Every structure is written in C-alpha cells, then in structure tokens.
Image (tube, rainbow, N blue to C red):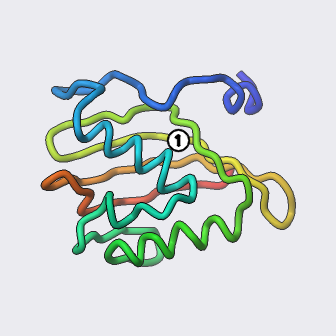
Amino acid sequence: MTKQQVISRPRGLINHRSTGSSPNSGAHRLYKRWITELWAGRRVAGELVAPDFVGHWPTRDVRGPDGLQAEVDRMHLALKELAFVLEVGPVVDGDMIAARWIATGAGEGGPVRYTGNDLLRVADGKIVEYWSGATRS
C-alpha cells in the first residue's frame, strides 16, 4: 500500500477493538473529542483535561489545560490544514487509552506528514497525563 493510499483510505475515527470497554464508553468518547475537536483546532482543552494535566513531549512537559491549548495552537500556526486519521484505536484498558494516527498538513515548505502514537491516562472523566510520540514521515 502506498503512502497516498493510507492517507486517502477511509478508516473512520474509531477502531472498535478494545479490551474491556465498549466503543461508546466514556474513554472512547473522550479520545474522539481529543483527536477530532482539540487537535482539529477547537479550543476545548479545558473540557478534556484535568487542571493538573501533564503532557510529556520528547523535549518538554506541558502542564494544565492552558499549556495544552497553547501547544495545540502553536501546531496550528506551524501547519495549516492539519488533519488526523486514526490507524489503530483507541484501545482502552482500565485508565489507559492508546491510539496510532497519521497527521497531514501544509508547512512552509509544502505538504508534511507525521505518524504518531498517543498514550493517555484518564481519571474522573478527564485526561490527566499524556505521552506524545510522533515522527515526520
């Protein structure tokens, strides 16, 4: 399968394979909002993450809803037309959510493509911790 086929192939936003959690669970809905609203540019960080949220990026930690929203806003300034497609997940196991995605957008030098993995920890219906892993492909 070519890279173009992967991006254009509709996979839907939710892969219903999970362990111990239905596709309509709160964790699945929370992740759907994470990827389709927050990372699409809507200013909903305060609705999705706890006040003591910590996001672990490879070079720094981001704290709280305001820090996360600022990180998302920076990404949207750097990449226009940013869009995500889920390849795997979300997979929910207890308080953990995992997913793999492809992101595309337009940077200063033209089209860009990233692949990445999300790992999130949830407590009391909010995301409390996040580990980011992405590679430009």
Residue at 15% x, 55% y: name it: 123
Helix, strand or loop at disc 1?
strand
Instruction: Name the residue at 23% across, 56% down.
Output: 126
| Residue 70 horizontal side relative to residue 84, left or right | left
Question: In which quadrant will I find the N terminus?
Answer: top right
**At label 1, which amino acid type do we have?**
Trp
User: Badge 1 is on which residue?
Assistant: 101
Q: Position of residue 57 (x, y in %)?
A: 44, 68
Out of 42 and 6, give the one closest to the viewer: 42
Image location (x, y in percent) of residue 91: 31, 34
120 is higher (above) or lower (below) than 64: above
Residue 66 to residue 115: above or below: below
Q: Residue at x 35, y 22 (%)?
A: 16
Give whichever of 25, 134 is nearer the camera. 25
Which residue is the extreme one toward the right?
109
Q: Could you tell me which residue is drawn at 23 percent across and 62 percent down?
A: 128
Considering depth in this image, is 10 or 134 the residue closer to the camera? Answer: 10
Residue 17 at x, y percent in the picture: 33, 22
Disc 1 crowd, CA 10 A, few/some/many (<14, 14-19, 20+)? some
